[in-house]
Image (cartoon, rainbow, N blue to C red):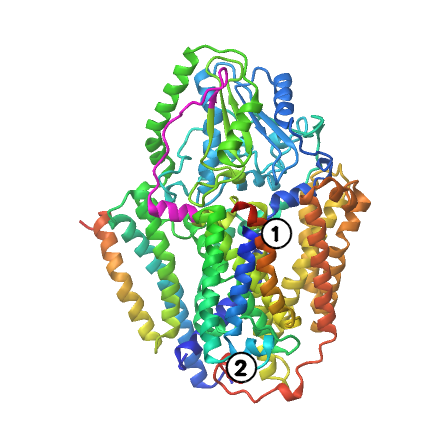
Amino acid sequence: MKQGFRQSMSWLHGWSGLILGWLLFAIFLTGTIAYFRQEVTLWMQPELHGSIPSPQAADIGLAKLTSVAPQASAWTINLPNDRNDTVRVSWQTQQPGERSNNAMGNNRQNIERQRGNGMEQTSGAGERDERSNRNRGNPIETRSGGNNRAAGDAIAPRNIGNERQRDGRPDQGAATTSGNNRSGNNEVRGGGGGRGQQSLTLDATTGEVLTPRETAGGNFLYRFHFELYALPRDWARWIVGIATLAMFVAIISGIITHKKIFKDFFTFRPAKGQRSWLDAHNATAVLALPFHIMITYSGLLLFTSTLLPWASSAIYGDNPRAAFAAMRAAEQQQEQEVRAALAKQGGGPMVPLGPLLKYAEDKWKQPASRILISEPGKPGSIIELLPTRNDSLVRQSGSGGLGDVRMTFNAATGELVQLGGEREQSTIAAINSALGSLHRARFASPGLRWLFFLSGVGGTIMMATGLVLWSVKRAEKNKLEKLPFGHRLVDHLNVGAVAGLFVAVAAYFWANRLLPVDLAARNEWEINVFFIVWAIMLLYPLLRPIKKAWIEQFSIAGALFALIPILNAATTSSHLAITIARGQWMIVGFDIVSCVTGLMLFYTAYRIKHYKGPQKAERKPRKAPAIQSEMMAAE
Amino acid sequence: MIGLSFSTAFLGFVLLALAMDRHHDQIIKGRPSSMARRLGTIGGWLCMLLSLALCIAAYGYSIGATWWLGVLTGVAAFLIFLLTYRPKTILYLAVTLPVITAVPLIPLF
Amino acid sequence: MAKDPADRTYRLGVLSRSVAGILGGYALASFSSLALALGLPFEKPDAINLGVMIGFILFAVAVIWAFSCRSAVRAWIGITAVTTPFLIITLLLNGWVS
């Protein structure tokens, strides 16, 4: 620090990156997989793989709802789309004594809660339903008639959300969101305590009811990346939040330290020891630099209610939701009036869904993914369609990519109905929404999702190479002495945290296929396998020399990942030959990405094994000033 | 359109790389002349802008800009791979890819 | 090596800077977000959002300042000097001091 500015930044970059680096690596790895969490969950429920999307999916859903829940107060149909191959239907039963008016509002309010939550700083509805990973004791979640929530990103089981509110856990964050947060609803009607919402998953071609296995799915990895596991929620969020702050500092100090990286970040010089690690670290950092900055900063903003709640609580007090409820009251009033006016026009049989869906698709240039029908068959019934994804970042992302946009029809006549106006959004709110959307990438079509995934992989490699680099740099300095304890600890943890986590993730997928299908608390066992394997991998280097431990763990992880397509073929009837023929690219993608990951891990192990250390000729005497500046000069 | 955006971004990065001593030497031996340096830099940035314009044309401003940053990341990763392991193919790809990806767009005009 | 007095000074310096950067930075982030949220003439949700966005950036700037300035004392002085006005604005606007 007595040295120049850049040296002090190099120091800061190294230490802020190291101290929380293992955690950040885990966050990056699981968060990157979480970009495909619906796809991962689908892969983990092979019972759903037989379902092939068909044009009559909407009618299949409607027919099922008509037969099982003719008296329901609200129906929801989730259609197959590019992240889901099944039809999911859910319905709300009207409670005796509950005013019809209330029930009618139910569906909408719940949807709005979901939508608002999507933008909520702390937890989106999408996150909420994955609380199911832990809420296994919840009676609502026991599979009543194939109740499928684990797969159900798109369906936010409201009961679970309500459950959380009844727990008295404050639903934070509403206040820190923009004025267009629609979640400002304190009262939750319907649902709660096992009544209200029920759902079924259907085959999208045959309409048969599907009962998927219990799995923690992609949702476990997703939740882990920001709430870890089995820790009190606030602690976990603080830990991840502090790691995010460290990351933010490390990024800025890293840019300052290595400002020459922009000059030749195309450079990668393999098999040259420290220089190669530095090249790889620089390349992955600069390549996806906009992504790294975005993901870190938006991550901080998403943690506002944990990290910087002061501004919100000074203005809204402890119950921000009440303030928003007031703001929203006028709007609800307007909606109720429209609904009342519709109800007066009288009812009639519902118009066919096909033309409405076609109309929406023509207008939106993308198919509708969700159909909401309130008060089916009764006067005043309306049909609402929601698109598959947002077409703009500044729209609220809501749950499962469903945003602010919707189309409302009178169910008896098929006429378009206007429910309340478009809400204005200020610039600041738009920036905030955009950052939230970018972090979650729910708006992303498959192609863009792959680019997000690729950037995430870049970040994961950046973290791993950074950790290794810390150790390699110091190893070259004190070559002859015995390594100090701190250094050995870092080496040890590097193996378990980097290679070991790959083994644990692979083991998690294997557990999904190999645990008995009817095992009680099966989803929990999948998670247990993950942590048990990881713990073993963390202890493993105690028994083996570091280099051997690296090679062996990468080899194990490589084998487990590379064999996943074979595991899938052996345990299900949806192997690659079938899924490619059927064009089920989500499942194909999982198998192939796993296999490629496995081969790359193998290759890594191979390279470590055959690495002889930097050649004598290449090593130049190093002086105290920053190594990287010398490297630049060396060219 | 997004394909053409990828390939123009690739061409842009190659031009920028050609303007740098080290990469110029990797791709076509020797150092760039000061003229080549200037042309490479300007041409490279123009290609980047064209790539951005194509993304925006395809997906609108906000999501188009997001696409563009993703495209740059993907293309730069590809170029690093080529520079390290297959530097000879770079020039060839930089010329042919934009042509190939432009073909599907002909009916639009 | 750890017994070297210069080394101990160095370690204390690092500790002091860390505290200044992390805790001082957090105080700066908190009070700047509060002061901006209370003081900016926008709609409340916008003011809160902007305050928080700036607060996080100031945190990072504070940490970088703490480790880049010439001495640990300067680190403390700098961060205190920037935090105090935000603190005063917060106190004034929030009615804790009348």
Q: Tell me if A310 is positioned left or right of A475 in this view.
A: left
The three-letter amino acid code for the residue at tag 2 is Arg
- Pointer 2: what residue? B31
The three-letter amino acid code for the residue at tag 1 is Ile
Residue numbers of the magenta segment: A409-434
Chain ID, mark 1 = A
- Residue occupying image coordinates x 59% and y 77%: B28
SS at circle 1:
helix
- Residue occupying image coordinates x 50% and y 70%: B16
In this rendering, the answer to whether A568 lies above or below A329 is: below
Q: Position of residue B84 (x, y in %)?
A: 63, 72
Magenta stretch, main secondary structure class:
loop
In this rendering, the answer to whether A43 lies above or below A500 is: above
Q: Residues within 10 Å of mark 1 (few under 14, many from 20)?
A: many
* Residue C10 can be seen in this image: yes
Queried whether the magenta region covers residue A429, the answer comes back as yes
Which corner quadrant of the image does residue A462 belong to? bottom right
Q: Residues within 10 Å of mark 2 (few under 14, many from 20)?
A: some
Q: Position of residue B17 (x, y in %)?
A: 53, 72
Distance in Å between CA atoms under marks 1 and 2: 43 Å
Q: Tell me if A479 is positioned left or right of B37 in this view.
A: right
